[in-house]
Amino acid sequence: MSAHYDYALDPGFKVLLASAGVRHQDVLRRAGLPEDLLNRPNVRVPADQFFAFTHAIQDSVDDPLFPIQLVDNASADSFSPTVFAALCSPDLTVAVTRLAMFKPLIAPVRLDVETSRAGLRITYQWHDSRVGPSPFLIGSEALFVVKLARMGTRHEVRATEVTLPEFPREREAHEAFLGCRIDRGDQLSVCFCPEDAKRPFLTDNSSMWDIFEPQLRKRLADLEGSASFEARTRAVLIEALPSGQVSVDLVAQRLALSSRTLQRRLRDEGTSFKAVVRETRKRLSLYYLEQTQLSYSEIAYLLAFEEPNSFFRAFHGWTGTTPETLRQSLRPNA
């Protein structure tokens, strides 16, 4: 299986590696990556570099319990939108189905989900790569899906069967976390009993899923190259605006283009970078006003305005009214 996507390297790895007594610069250098990579905004790398980074973590962290500590200390607010959307599911079966749909956004792997009378089975197929996944990465994925089930149900869910291509160091500790023995197999697979597969998620939130799904589908289409440059630019802006990163140079870099090429492609589609920024801000402002309780100052910040008055002026230019008036008309009881 091959793919041409790229994948996020979370800046949170700096803290996690530091907690293990390892400098993230040393890990990046070992992986053949720039030492300042995790200091850059919205970093994404191809599969080879993604896998190389996880190999470097494994080679740099001497603690065999690090994968367990990494997963066990995870909290919902530290997850990507893809994983958070899975937590909004009604049960584990739906959660891993959604995770399988959007997993290509965050890692070079495909999840095959199978349900039967025996329960739920998730099998992992890694993308073709010169490097390939590290045992650290494979083992962490097994631990993570069990952690996901526990976070959603608030129940001590245990896997019923786990297979790994090779046994982890401190195998007994890993088996204690997973709740079952680990067997050797060609592929990573994790199974759950029917009762746990259908156990209700207390984190179920259909409204949040309705918000996440179209954005995630659009991002997936963008990665597959089927979207227009306007849509691809808008998808990057949606992620970048809260950090204040709205320059054409940054967006072009994320799309692996020069700024001149991006502007030419947008011009060929009958628009401009400035117009896409304006339309993206307008759409997001309407969404925030209707769907959230965010204050006007918070909305201004998320749209990368330097101060609220700039947002108010821009909003009036877009709609001919004020944010407060529009919010009251959209949500009379707000």
Image (tube, rainbow, N blue to C red):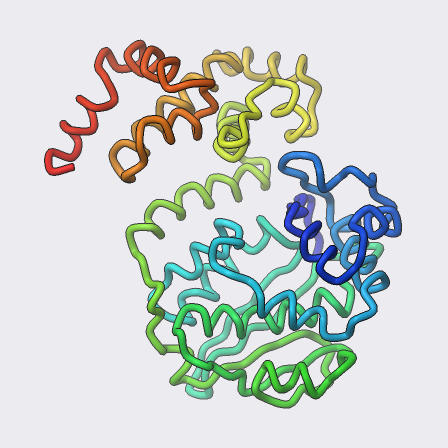
Q: Quadrant of the rendered structure where residue 161 is?
A: bottom right
In the visual, does 202 lie left or right of 269? left
Q: Is 163 located above or below residue 218 in the figure? A: below
Q: Position of residue 166 (x, y in %)?
A: 78, 79
Residue situated furthest left in the rendering: 332
Q: Quadrant of the rendered structure where residue 86 is?
A: bottom left
Q: Residue at x 64, y 50 (%)?
A: 12
Where does the C terminus fall, quadrant-wise?
top left
Q: Position of residue 145 (x, y in %)?
A: 54, 70
Where does the N terminus fall, quadrant-wise?
bottom right
Q: Looking at this view, is 79 or 194 the one in front? A: 79
Q: Residue at x 27, y 39 (%)?
A: 293
Q: Residue at x 39, y 43 (%)?
A: 214
Q: How many numbered marks does the figure carry? A: 0
Q: Is 106 located above or below residue 178 in the figure? A: above
Q: Is 227 located above or below residue 75 in the figure? A: above
Q: Looking at this view, is 248 or 261 the one in front? A: 248
Q: Position of residue 157 (x, y in %)?
A: 47, 81
Q: Residue at x 61, y 61 (%)?
A: 110
Q: Is 26 located above or below residue 92 in the figure? A: above
Q: Position of residue 244 (x, y in %)?
A: 54, 26
Q: Looking at this view, is 314 or 90 the one in front? A: 314
In the visual, does 12 lie left or right of 82? right
